[in-house]
Image (cartoon, grey):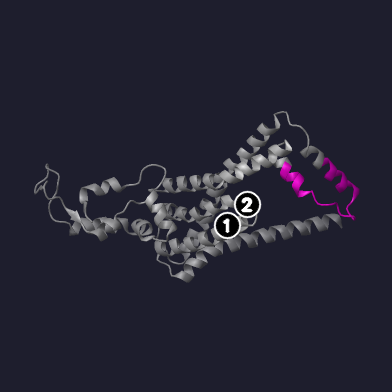
């Protein structure tokens, strides 16, 4: 396999999505063509330019040789493979989230339309569908009946339309949620990587780690009984392993440090949430005393 050195400018990222072949390669853990290009792109291009024959296909320059343009080896071509931009990473996360939300959207619409009301009211009624506790106070029992009544009220819009619009809102919100995790949690991972000695840049890190969200496509099977939870578990494990491998290749950290980088921000976030919940509960107890 060979390539013209003058064509390397065509390998610059454009558009909002990376090449489909790179997506397939990542899902099959063939990460060198993606992660290696992001990590070694400047050095690879410099090496290719030095090792190429001292000719050029530009007729305006001395030593031009249009019939025999400089050729790169297969290793060099893979090294200067198309890189992924941060914009393409963002587009990949958004499209993945939208595809993963198609089946849940249809399922939510069908459930809400059957009841004839908006999806949040159906979900709210579902949370209180259990029999009331015998020790529950009368005010809570009154709220229970009120919420159940609200969930069954006829909306101003036709029931199927209100159900569809509310389910559509949940679907559209999913890419925003995934983007938040990609940016915020990814920043936490990058900070840990930096503390452990990584030298990658913010743009490269976000661009490549966006591929780790691809296995979450399996979450679209969530509404299917039994299969949905199993698919979600496989998606989470697959995403974690892929994320760790990407971090390891991109930053040069060993496996242990890569795993620590991915887990530590989540552990710290969970600890902060538990402390906040504990402080809230203590404040409530003090108020009732």
Predominant SS of the magenta segment? helix
Question: Which image quarter is the N terminus in?
Answer: bottom left
Classify residue 245 as left or right of residue 62: right
Please give the name of the residue rendered at 81% of the width and 52% of the height, measured from the top-left corner: 130
Few, some or many residues within 10 Å of mark 2 (<14, 14–19, 20+): some
Residue 84 makes an appearance in the image: no
**Residue 260 in magenta?**
no
User: Quarter-wise, where is residue 78 in the image?
Assistant: bottom left
Magenta-drawn segment: 122-146
Q: Which labelled disc corresponds to residue 224?
A: 2
Question: Which image quarter is the C terminus in?
Answer: bottom right
C-alpha separation, residue under disc 1 versus residue under disc 2: 10 Å
User: Quarter-wise, where is residue 150 in the image?
Assistant: top right
User: Quarter-wise, where is residue 253 in the image?
Assistant: bottom left
Q: Which labelled disc corresponds to residue 217?
A: none
Classify residue 78 as left or right of residue 116: left
Please give the name of the residue rendered at 36% of the width and 59% of the height, measured from the top-left corner: 39
Residue 212, x across and y down, in percent = 48, 56
User: What is the secondary structure assignment of the residue under circle 1?
Assistant: helix
Residue 34, x across and y down, in percent = 37, 56
Question: Residue lying furthest left in this view?
Answer: 63
Residue 260 makes an appearance in the image: yes
In the displayed structure, 121 sits above or below 40; it is: above
Residue at the spot of label 1: 231
Residue 280, x across and y down, in percent = 74, 56
Residue 25, x across and y down, in percent = 39, 56
Q: Earlier in the sequence, mark 1 or mark 2?
A: 2
Instruction: State the residue in front, 104 or 15.
Output: 104
**Residue 135 in magenta?**
yes
């Amino acid at each position: 396999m060979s390539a013209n050195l003058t064509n390397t400018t065509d390998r610059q990222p454009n558009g909002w999505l990376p090449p489909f072949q790179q997506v397939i390669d990542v899902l099959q853990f063939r990460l060198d063509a993606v992660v290696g290009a992001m990590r070694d792109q400047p050095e690879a291009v410099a090496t290719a330019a030095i090792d190429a024959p001292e000719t050029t296909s530009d007729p305006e320059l001395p030593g031009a040789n249009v019939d025999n343009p400089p050729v790169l080896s297969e290793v060099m071509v893979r090294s200067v493979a198309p890189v992924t931009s941060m914009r393409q990473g963002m587009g990949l996360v958004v499209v993945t989230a939208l595809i993963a939300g198609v089946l849940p959207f249809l399922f939510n619409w069908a459930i809400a339309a059957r009841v004839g009301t908006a999806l949040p009211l159906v979900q709210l009624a579902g949370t209180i569908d259990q029999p009331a506790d015998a020790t529950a106070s009368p005010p809570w029992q009154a709220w229970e009946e009120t919420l159940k009544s609200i969930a069954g009220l006829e909306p101003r819009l036709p029931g199927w339309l209100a159900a569809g619009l509310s389910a559509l809102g949940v679907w559209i919100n999913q890419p925003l949620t995934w983007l938040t995790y990609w940016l915020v949690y990814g920043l936490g991972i990058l900070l840990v990587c930096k503390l452990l000695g990584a030298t990658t840049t913010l743009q490269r890190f976000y661009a490549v780690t966006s591929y780790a969200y691809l296995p979450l496509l399996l979450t679209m099977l969530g509404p299917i009984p039994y299969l949905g939870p199993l698919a979600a578990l496989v998606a989470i494990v697959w995403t974690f392993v892929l994320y760790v491998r990407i971090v390891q290749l991109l930053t040069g950290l060993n496996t242990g440090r890569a795993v620590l980088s991915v887990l530590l921000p989540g552990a710290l976030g969970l600890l902060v949430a538990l402390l906040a919940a504990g402080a809230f509960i203590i404040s409530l107890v003090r108020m009732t005393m």
